[in-house]
Image: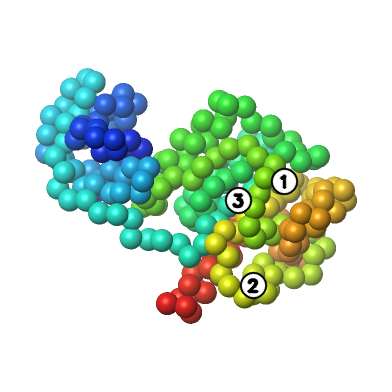
Amino acid sequence: MIRIYYPDFLINDSKESIVDLSIIHRLNNVLRVGKGNQIEIFNREGKIFCVEIEKKALKQIDVKIINSYDNPHNASSDIILAVAFPKGKRGEWIIEKATELGVKKIIILETHRSVMKPGEGRINKWKQIAIHASEQSKRTDVPEINLGNIEEIKGTKIAAIIGSKLSIKETLDKNQDIPKVVTYLVGPEGDWTEEEKKHLIELGVSPVTLGSITLRVETAALYGVAVIAEWTNQNKKKIL
């Protein structure tokens, strides 16, 4: 079934209709849905609606709700990915795959050796990639994407740093409780500067190793997210 993210659907007494012109264009001209077709809509509150197309027009599509339900999948921890993005398509790949892996938020870090300083246009493009990845992967939310700095990050923080001793799992295992939020930081290719490493430690960030092979930024980012997601899922099962 076709899935569409419509953030304001049935929020604040809105009607059972689609009025966002970009979504209407996509449904009419790209996905080519017709009267009687069923689609799934999820909004920014995580509520899911199975609807049937009742009436189509250029500026509005009326729908009938068949059923609705709340997001049944609640992660034990929220994962935040904070990364110094590489140039080109590799950044888009990080956004797409991190979304599929379930990250709650993606922070674009600026570091001393950063090569990518995205503007508003690039960030908006990444947000669209995240929306499509959420639709495809059956997520019922879309990760936030914005610029940020290390000082603003709260909660449990771990950073991939070349030469560290403990793995991600070993570091997380030291926690007595499952952390509510885990932020995973990945620096630029060439690693963090020595000053940045020192600053990370001062801010309470735990350094972790990803093994003996030096990974590119996008590989390091997604490998770490996958390990953290697996760890939180396994530990959630232990306390259920």
Label pair 3/2, CB-CB below 8 angstroms = no
Residue most toward the top? 58
Residue 221 in view here: no
State whether residue 54 is above or below residue 159. above
Q: Which of label 3 and label 2 is nearer to you?
A: 2
Q: Residue drawn 48% across and 72% down?
A: 236
Residue on which disc 2 sits: 175
For marks 2 and 1 on the same chain, the one whose residue lies earlier in the sequence: 1
For this view, does 84 lie left or right of residue 181?
A: right
For marks 3 and 2 on the same chain, the one whose residue lies earlier in the sequence: 3
Label pair 2/1, CB-CB below 8 angstroms = no
Q: Residue drawn 51% across and 31% down?
A: 125
Q: Residue drawn 34% across and 26% down?
A: 22
For this view, does 86 lie left or right of residue 112?
A: left
For marks 3 and 1 on the same chain, the one whose residue lies earlier in the sequence: 3
Residue most toward the bottom? 238
Residue on which disc 1 sits: 151
In this rendered view, identify the residue nearer to me: 6 or 187: 6
Label pair 3/1, CB-CB below 8 angstroms = no
Task: Give the alpha-carbon distance from disc 2 to disc 1, as whole Å.
Answer: 22 Å
Q: In the image, what residue type sits under mark 2?
A: Asn
Q: In the image, what residue type sits under mark 3?
A: Leu
Q: In the image, what residue type sits under mark 1?
A: Glu
Q: How many marks?
A: 3
Residue on which disc 3 sits: 81
**Which quadrant of the view contains residue 132?**
top left
- Assess disc 1: are there few (<14), some (14-19) or many (≥20) residues with their C-alpha within 10 Å of its C-alpha: few
Query: For the residue labelled by badge 1, is the local secondary structure a helix, a strand or a loop?
Result: helix
